[in-house]
Image: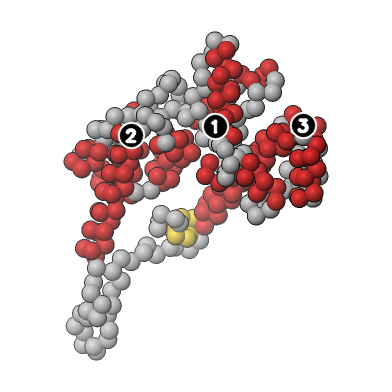
């Protein structure tokens, strides 16, 4: 049984315990930070309590990206069934709690002066001074809330810029594609740096925007974040090439699901373009 994930509700809960009887997704290697069977069951237990995969991963100090790749694994049928069951259980219990707290509109408690009383069916917690209600409906220090939002925005921006580097590296050998990119985006591009997969001159101060031509081209080419890409999954192709190269040298494939290899960053595998770059996983 998983450790108590989110309060007493998940302790010795027959319905949650039944969900944890799934067959865990097998891991190629057991390394520090990977999704072991125990951690997979803890995730499902937490998911069954509040129904939020992101919140479950946050509580465990894990990356949701790695969990989503685990979910999409060809060997994850039993795990996916437990996931869906956990979501259904969380939804049903939330609906039951809401129904139990529901007060029929127009219901009035007797008072001397006959003033109307309309109790809120499901009152939200009252935020104190300097606090806000976060995405979980909980009170959080406003500075902490804003900082988390900025950190998330910066993280996504860095991933998108790294994706653009991979796209620029791919087209760096074609003068026609280089010219088309410069004309469409009107951005300064150092093609020598692009060929080496290095940061471009505008990266230290550039903020990414998925509506801008450079990021649209990156997404359409397949070098982008998971479901954002429209073309072939170039990240998956690159990872397969890295694993193929490692196999040719007698090395084990990279465990892309493990956070210890940086697999939580879906857009940063090191391209096999040099001695060191060919043998390491994503950073």
Q: Position of residue 224 (x, y in %)?
A: 60, 41
Q: Cα distance, mark 1 to mark 2? A: 21 Å
Of the two numbered discs 1 and 2 on the same chain, state the one appearing first in sequence: 2
Q: Cα distance, mark 3 to mark 1? A: 22 Å
Decide if residue 259 is in sight here.
yes
Given the current orientation, which residue lies at the most extreme front position?
176
Of the two numbered discs 3 and 1 on the same chain, state the one appearing first in sequence: 3
| Secondary structure under the numbered disc 2 in the rendered image | helix
In the image, what residue occupies the spot 54% across and 32% down?
Answer: 236
Of the two numbered discs 2 and 3 on the same chain, state the one appearing first in sequence: 2
| Left or right, residue 162 beside residue 79 | right
Residue denoted by label 3: 173
For marks 3 and 1, give the one nearer the viewer.
Answer: 3
- Examine the image and state in which quarter residue 1 appears: top left
- Examine the image and state in which quarter residue 233 appears: top right
Q: Which image quarter is the C terminus in?
A: top right
Given the current orientation, which residue lies at the most extreme bottom position?
113
| Secondary structure under the numbered disc 3 in the rendered image | loop
For marks 2 and 3, give the one nearer the viewer.
Answer: 3
Residue denoted by label 2: 77
| Left or right, residue 174 beside residue 212 | right
Marks 3 and 1 in Cβ contact (< 8 Å) = no
Residue denoted by label 1: 236
Seen from the viewer's position, the closer of residues 109 and 167 is 167
Marks 2 and 3 in Cβ contact (< 8 Å) = no
Residue 237's place in the image compared with 177, above or below, is above
């Amino acid at each position: 049984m998983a450790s108590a994930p989110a309060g007493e509700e998940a302790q010795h809960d027959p319905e949650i315990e039944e969900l944890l009887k799934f067959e865990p997704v097998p891991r190629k290697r057991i390394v520090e930070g990977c999704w072991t069977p125990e951690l997979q069951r803890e995730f499902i237990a937490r998911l069954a309590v509040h129904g939020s995969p992101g919140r479950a991963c946050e509580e465990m100090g894990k990356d949701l990206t790695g969990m989503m790749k685990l979910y999409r694994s060809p060997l994850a049928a039993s795990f996916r069934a437990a996931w869906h069951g956990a979501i259904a259980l969380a939804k049903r219990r939330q609906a039951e709690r809401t129904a139990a707290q529901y007060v029929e509109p127009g219901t009035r408690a007797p008072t001397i002066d006959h003033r109307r009383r309309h109790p809120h069916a499901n009152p939200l917690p009252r935020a104190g001074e300097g606090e806000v209600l976060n995405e979980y409906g909980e009170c959080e220090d406003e500075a902490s809330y804003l900082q988390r939002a900025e950190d998330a925005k910066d993280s996504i921006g860095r991933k998108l810029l790294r994706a653009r580097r991979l796209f620029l590296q791919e087209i760096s050998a074609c003068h026609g594609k280089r010219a088309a990119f410069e004309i469409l985006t009107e951005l300064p591009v150092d093609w020598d740096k692009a060929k080496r997969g290095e940061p471009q001159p505008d990266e230290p101060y550039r903020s990414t925007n998925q509506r801008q031509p450079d990021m649209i081209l990156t997404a359409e080419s397949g070098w982008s974040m998971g479901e954002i890409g429209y073309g072939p999954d170039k990240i998956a192709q690159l990872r397969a090439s890295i694993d193929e190269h490692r196999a040719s040298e007698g090395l084990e494939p990279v465990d892309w699901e493990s956070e210890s290899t940086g697999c939580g960053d879906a857009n940063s595998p090191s391209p096999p373009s040099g001695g060191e770059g060919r043998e390491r996983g994503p950073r």
